Image: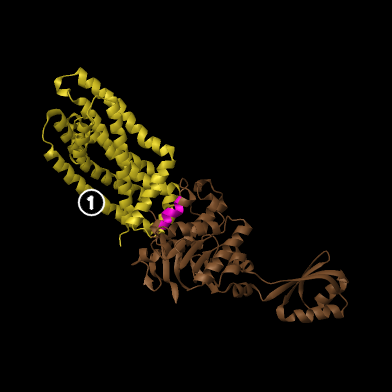
Chain colours: A brown, B yellow
Amino acid sequence: MSVLNVKNLTKHFSSGIWPFKTQHYTAVNNISFHVKAGEILGFLGPNGAGKTTTIQMLLGTLTPSSGSISYFDTDFAQNRIDILKRIGYASGYDKLPARLTVGENLDVVGRIYGITQPFRRQKIETLLNFFGIWEMRNRQTGTLSAGQATRVMLAKAFISDPELVLLDEPTASLDPNVADEVRHFILEDCKERGTSILITSHNMNEVTELCDRVLVLKKGIIIADSTPKILAQSTTSYLFINLTIASNLDRACAYLNGALLKYTVQGNQITIEIEEFAIAQFIANLSERNIIYSHISIDKPTLEDYFLSIVSR
Amino acid sequence: MFSCASVWAIVLRHMRMWKRDPNLLLSGFYWPLLDIVVWGFLGSWIARSLTAEFYNYEAVALLGILLWQVVGRGCNTMCLVLTEELWSNNIMNLFSLPVRTTEWMCSVILFNAIVLSLLTTVCMFVMFLLYDISVWYILSTFLIFLPPLFISSIWIGFTCLQIVVTLGKRSAELGFVFAWFLLPFSGAYYPIEVLPEWGQTISKFLPMSYVFQGMREYLMYDQNPTSYLIKGYALSILYATCAIILFMYCFNRSRRKGLARLAD
């Protein structure tokens, strides 16, 4: 079952004042996608690709020019409030009211979701403890560091036990260890409660670790929809072998030239571009020619390679 | 279904903010109290110095000031509820929660009512301390003229909010001064007859001018203010209805351009 179904979603922005309006910019251009129950979908794309515009439309804070959004097989435009009760949202770019304490802010959000006492207090305590900010419950939100504020936003997103959570760059300002805890929480929540997640991030390792599937948006159009692994492999079918040569560097270069393999040399380090199936034979050939290496590592193409390739295209 | 819990949650959010922000408390209470002191003593002096026609001018001045706070401060409070969300970059958070536009609008009106209740209570206490005037006399007269002015604060407030929700936080100042632009034509401190003819024409379209005229007739000449009050009620209810409908239209129109842009 799809928890979110987007069909032909388009957003045009126009400039000027009526009657001299000119349509000049299409932020999102006829995109369609879905999120399945329990799935973690990554939303990637360079700046200005239309990710945040899409998330704003998915939350109803921006009205689409055309197309349809339905959650849980229900039309969003007709049932916005009922659907929003089942959705969580957090963004690294938004802030909660600075003068209110952490506890007060979450209390307001809990009340709006209709969570009654004592469940509201228990839920706030559980989430603040999980994110390691329970001690800060009585501190004004404006006095928190960026990382602490992001954790409060995440607690806000999960306070109503949502079925789908939209996360816009959630770990952007977090320390690596806290970001790792957050990823762990998202994966656990997804596994235990079957929560679906739609996440935008510029951290490719994070997307690779978290996401079952990735949508790539460029200039408002979806240009790829696949798993992180397949996307990474689509960059190149070659792997990179890094060898630290202990002896016979000249002989190694002569062999590589003869085998017509692409390579680069830096000191006694050689990086060779090679297809995966040829690795075993390549290593055997090195031994036959008495080429001794002290270290070997193999780099596979990553999602980051893919991302960089589509940005530069 | 309409959620009273959501309405109260948003009211609580703003009450908690006022509790913590000395600037808000200062601007919300300092200027009205200063008006009470300055205009009250001026009224006492005029009442003592001039003809019998001005015998009750102290009460007229004090009530005029107090009732104008309902309109002016009320409008400012309503405007502040939205601009605070924009300044704190909370607009996306707020409207991505399950809050209906009507619930948010009700919370704005309720918060306005709470702030005005506190403000008028404090002002009346100061009047009781500073002036030789019966609190019950002031309170009973205040309550007669309060409802149409509270409704006026709602229509002016939502008119200001239309400006902010259309143009964003950079237009907030325009929203704040709008009510005070109407002050000279409302006849809060003086009868509208002293205005030039074009000013009197503007006054005829303002419900506040009828209410303040009725208040003066009642306090200074002991006249029945009912006919003035009816005009005040009719116009303020008509304007409030139009302002609420227009605000909802502007808000939905703003959604088409994106609520997030309002905070830029």
Q: Position of residue A207 (x, y in %)?
A: 58, 67
**Which residue ends up furthest to the top in the rendered image?**
B49
* Residue B229 in which image quadrant: top left
Q: Position of residue B21 (x, y in %)?
A: 43, 40
As helix, strand or loop, the secondary structure at mark 1 comes to helix
| Tag 1 residue | B241
For the residue marked with disc 1, what is the amino acid? Thr
Question: Which residue: 53% across, 45% down?
Answer: A143
**Which residue ends up furthest to the front in the rendered image?**
A118
Note whether residue B219 is visible. yes
Q: Is residue A122 left or right of residue A204?
A: left
Main SS category, magenta section: helix
Q: Is residue A106 magenta?
A: yes
* Residue A202 in which image quadrant: bottom right
> From what the image shows, is residue A163 above or below residue A1?
above
Q: Position of residue B141 (x, y in %)?
A: 19, 35
Question: Which residue: 35% across, 56% down?
Answer: B5
Front in this rendered view, residue A61 or A216: A61
Q: Image quadrant for the N terminus of chain B? A: bottom left
Disc 1 sits on a residue from what chain?
B
Q: Position of residue B253 (x, y in %)?
A: 34, 57
Magenta residues, as a range?
A: A104-110
> From what the image shows, is residue B29 above or below residue B159?
above
Q: Is residue B211 magenta?
A: no
Note whether residue B89 is visible. no
Mark 1 surroundings: few (<14), some (14-19) or many (≥20) residues within 10 A: some
Q: Is residue A183 left or right of residue B124?
A: right
